[in-house]
Image: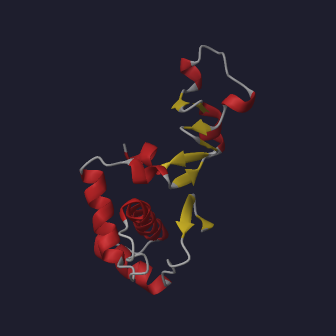
Amino acid sequence: MLLKIIGNLKIIKLKTMKIKRSKLKELAIEFIGNDSLEAQNQIMLKIATARCARVSYTVVGEEGKDSNYINDIKLHDRLLASKHMSPAEHCAKVMSNEEYNTHVRGKCFYQETLNAHIPIGDSLGWCRNFKGFIQYRELVS
């Protein structure tokens, strides 16, 4: 598995997932309505999340099936609509400096709620079990 940073998203790029830019733009227009870089990132995130879900439910012997990006996007949308969020725990975005300094041990506490006590050291920058990254699940739930 390879990781690729695109914009502010850390996208999981599986060896079998090599989307041509032209296909990515086409999918972004079809499902989001434009082919901006942000829309393309959203499409990749949807596909990556659906692939994470598929890993858990792949039938033995069907691992090598050709990927179908449209079905992946539809699966992502069904998962979110039904509040099945565990596959969204495996994709994340890089924290900004502000996010890093306000996420403390899995919760987001802003400075004004800390009563001037700002934790230091290893307690900063945590979002659930990721340090320095915000899980996609946090962003959509």
Residue ID at (48%, 81%): 19
Instruction: Let me know if residue 103 appears in the view.
Output: yes
Q: Could you tell me which quadrant the C terminus lies in? A: top left
Q: Is residue 7 above or below residue 117?
A: below
Place residue 79 in its image quadrant. Answer: bottom left
Query: 25 or 73: nearer the eye?
Result: 73
Q: Is residue 66 above or below residue 60?
A: below
Q: Is residue 21 above or below residue 108?
A: below
Residue 56 at x, y = what percent?
A: 40, 59
Is 105 left or right of 53, judged from the image as shown?
A: right
Is 63 left or right of 112, judged from the image as shown?
A: left
Is 94 left or right of 16, judged from the image as shown?
A: right
Is 5 left or right of 58, judged from the image as shown?
A: right
Residue ID at (45%, 43%): 138
Residue ID at (35%, 79%): 68
Q: Is residue 13 above or below residue 53?
A: below
